[in-house]
Amino acid sequence: MGAVYGMLGDAGSEELQAMGTRLEHRGTESAHWSPVSGLWLGVRGSGSAVQAQRDGPIAFDGAIDNRQALARRLGHRPDRAQPAGDGALAAKLWAVLGEEGLAQIAGQFALALWDARGRRLVLARDRVGYAPLYFAVAGERLVFASEYKALLALEVTPARPNRAALQSIQSTKWVRPGVTCLEGVHPVAPGSLMEVQAGRAASRRYWDIPVRAADLDEAGHAGRLRESFLETLRRQTEPYDRIGVSLSGGLDSAVVAAGVRAVAGSREIHTFSAGYGEDDKELVNAAAVAREVGATHHPVVLDPDDLPELLPWMVWHLEEPIGREDIAYLFLAAREASEYVDLIVTGFGFDGLFAGLPRHRLVDLSVKYPAVRGPLEEFFDYTFRSVEPRTLAGRALKKAYFRGREFPAPQILGTPPLAPYAGFPRGGDQPLTEFLKRGFLVLPYQHPVERLYAGVGMRMNAQHTNPDFLATAFAIPDRLKIHGRTQKYILRRACEGLLPPSILATGKSFNRLKHDTRMSDTLDRLADDLLSPRTIARRGLIDPAYVARLRRRPPGRPYSQERAYRLWSLLLTELWARRFLDERGAAPGHSLPPVRHLVGGVPDRVPATVGSA
């Protein structure tokens, strides 16, 4: 957990200092330097990591999990390859192997590197984009940083809303690939590098996922997946004496906890979960998993009364108005985890690798029953992008599922309708896996969540930062991902013996707040402050009539789940606008609320020692 930042073009030291200060939550020390005239590099992190990179050709943030194997390939002694020296190792990989060296890194990273031979600046990110990196053109200069709030520390960087990106979030919960909610600010794409040379910039992928089913039987696939799963965890946790696991109530985090126990030996394992109270099924399930693996468990509670103080900080760290209460839960658990461990391992991404979401079932059904492909695609497009079905059959599926509980997404003023959906993959040997690849490459769920952990001084990791694990997952045929009515079938088979059958049989779960009148009353209080007609009109993003219609609810009755989610998204959007448009990325001026621990089934408020950020 650290940061990189810098500028191509004339710069003053005070400008670099301002950028580094905006990223101080990502590391205790910082330095900036000029490796060549007209280029400034900056890095923030631990003291040893900063000193190892200072004045060199690279600014590097990340952790190379296979550092010893890569050091051997470069002819170095493996024991010389320490985490603080990962930046130097990455620079050597580039010097010897070029972009092929980046493709061999297992782990998360973002880097800015001056390639003296090619007289070019190289910006790159890991294959799934866990480590963030953004860039913008500011006048005659190119500026870049791990978080775009650092770019806004420079007055020459515009702070204008990207209306199309905001529309995508209102429709899908997530920002579109390749853009941010700030006009002119872009992410370096995951698994890609950007070269800047002689005033021109070009981007290309240095890594791709082959979809090619391996010629193995079911037992062979399960054994291969288990071996890769445990070896990845061994590498990721090896440097740490105390290991944290983010536990929800579902299967993915449970198998990660069991896998960590299998490789950790006698080392301490701490598990962290958040929910709404003692009757939250997710907290109950998480506690059972923690007991099974012998972990010290830390359950915390999110009370609706804490949302007004919590959400501004959450949005500031995420830098986009995305997600629902599951993201707030993660932020709360991350704050608790920072008191006990330095690394959190998660199960994020397993759904996208092994077809664990309801929409993956739709793809599977469309392959098995091509006659209903069209209506299934329309229903998927409505649930995923809020695009109304066109056919009678599509509308019938929507009506049967929602039973009148749905509410349309808002239209950001000045934006066109979403482009037509491309449809499910057609043809090929493994259409479901091709669909998973499409989602994995363009819309990884995980990378925004890294900011929540980084914001409290934590490093997060997960299985798919290892290219060998990804190659194993995408070599598994469709029939073993959804097998009959069972989703993530091969993952369950691979983890047999690590957990009891009752836990391995766990279905898909979602961390949600209790959508009761108390929750709705909290949303209304927030809306009274953030979404008044005057505020909405001044902001100019949403039609005030839409908000008025959305907020109608009978006295003493809660919002429906769909209305609550629409209102939640609009609240986050206004909080984002205040932080990044009005305040140009400055942090909120209030402290975070104390963490509520679940003690004996009763939440109590215990002041966090993390600080306000």
Image (cartoon, rainbow, N blue to C red):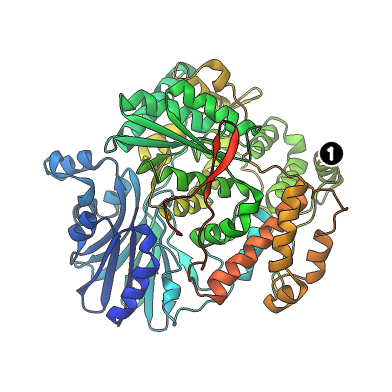
Residue 323 in picture, x, y percent from top left: 60, 52
In the figure, is residue 523 to the left or right of 348? right
Mark 1 secondary-structure assignment: helix
Q: Nearer the viewer, residue 420 or 540?
A: 540
The location of residue 312, given as percent across then percent down, is 56, 62
Q: In the rendered view, does 108 fall on the left or right side of 248?
A: left
| Residue at which label 1 appears | 400
Residue 335 vertical placement versus 221 (above, below):
below
Taking depth in this image into account, of 87 and 561 the one nearest to the observer is 561
Number of marks in the rendered image: 1
Q: Quadrant of residue 133?
A: bottom left
Q: State which quadrant residue 152 falls in.
A: bottom left
Location of residue 328 with respect to 156 vertically, above or below: above
Q: Residue at x 38, y 73 (%)?
A: 143
Identify the amino acid type marked 1. Answer: Ala
Query: At which x and y percent is residue 531?
Result: 72, 68
Q: Is residue 494 at least partly visible in the picture?
A: no
Q: Position of residue 575 (x, y in %)?
A: 61, 65
Q: Nearer the viewer, residue 146 or 298?
A: 298
Q: What crowding class fits label 1: few (fewer than 14 Cα within 10 Å), some (14-19), or many (20 or more)?
A: few
Give the quarter of the figure containing the C terminus: bottom left
Which residue is rendered at x = 60% and y = 45% of the image? 302
- Is any atom of residue 138 visible in this view? yes
